[in-house]
Image (cartoon, rainbow, N blue to C red):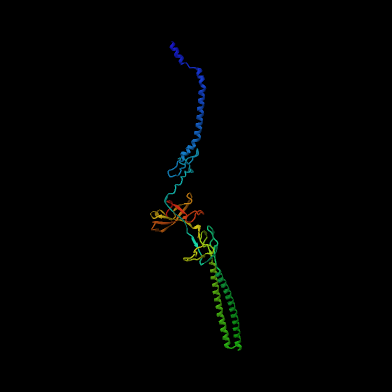
Amino acid sequence: MENREALLQKLRIDREATRASSPSVYRGLTIAAVVLVIVGGAAYFLWPEAADDQATPEADDGTVARAAAVAPGAPSSVDAGAGPNATAPVAAPAPRKAVLNASGYVTARRMATVSSEITGRITEILIEEGMKVKAGQIIARLDDTLARTDFELAVARVAAAKADLANAEADLREGERVLRRARELIKSEFVSEADLTQKQAQVEALKARLQRSRANLKVSELTLRRRRETVDKYLVRAPFAGVIVNKAAQAGEIVSPVSAGGGFTRTGIGTLVDMDSLEIEVDVNEAYIGRVHPGQSVTAVLDAYPDWQIPASVIAIIPTADRAKATVRVRIAIDSKDPRIFPEMGIKVTFHGDGERK
């Protein structure tokens, strides 16, 4: 009996001990509930960002595949029950395929070393490097002292020829008047046949003199025109609109259209470039020239601006090869003109495989 009572005492619950330990248990449960709420809220706010990160994986070719976002409740374009006005998802354009890379230089189709048509001493230079000029603008003046004297002499000769012509016309009018009077007087026998013949000969001589005076005036006018053009040649003008990239002469120097060996004669005054005629020239290995055709799209990148892609297109393939380098020259048009592009700049181009052969 005593053993049974001892066992029953062990199985009895101590109410006082349970009441003493209950506050600590409640505090533990409360802290656990708060932690669960915080973790659940963080997971709720962070879950959409994780979903977005999983929806835009990076493709192998460096492009990012974008997932189309569908509003809740909106019909999907791939649903069988979608209406006729449902919009299909637009796929991102595929990158253009590069078939060939090459390097070359920017060149100008219109570039000229401006010189004078005659030999002379420069009296004034009106250009500087980087200056924009118009077509026909005066860029230099030469010493035209003798040429201008010849021009003034030609002007005087024209004036003299005009005066001689006026005198010849007056003499002819007087001779014709005398001849008419002689013909009237011969009827009354106041003038002999010999006098009448003499008057007719004088009129013919005056007519010849008039023709000579007219010819002399013509010669004088042509001489004046030539002297005027000669004087104009002492003014050096720009042959076309462009930018001066080089100033090759100074005031006081002698300039000539031909080279004077062993002397200090300049053969040019400056170099003019038409910036609107810039294009690209590259040498393509003849083994790969079959990948290039006129009209082909090209992307060009200047060495000075490696992050700037310039749209371009092939103009023509020069139909000859360089035997020493085994290359073929290709002309490329720059589709977008820009003041940052200068002649002789180094440039790299990429030929694309899109487009049709023309």
Single out the residue that lies furthest toward the top: 1
Point out the image quarter for the N terminus.
Answer: top left
Task: Kindly identify the residue that appears in the image at 51 percent across and 21 percent down.
Answer: 22
Q: Nearer the viewer, residue 129 or 14?
A: 129
User: Within the image, what quadrant is residue 221 found in?
Assistant: bottom right
Task: Kindly identify the residue that appears in the image at 50 percent across and 18 percent down.
Answer: 17
Q: Nearer the viewer, residue 246 or 168?
A: 246
Q: Is residue 72 left or right of residue 178?
A: left
Let me know if residue 205 appears in the view: yes
Q: Is residue 146 left or right of residue 297?
A: right
Q: Nearer the viewer, residue 14 or 244?
A: 244
Picture coordinates of residue 54 (x, y %)? 46, 38
Picture coordinates of residue 35 (x, y %)? 50, 29
Let me know if residue 358 appears in the view: no
Point out the image quarter for the C terminus.
Answer: bottom left
Picture coordinates of residue 315 (x, y %)? 45, 56
Task: Kindly identify the residue that appears in the image at 56 percent across and 82 percent down.
Answer: 205
Picture coordinates of residue 322 (x, y %)? 40, 58
Task: Kindly identify the residue that appears in the image at 51 percent across and 23 percent down.
Answer: 24
Q: How many marks?
A: 0
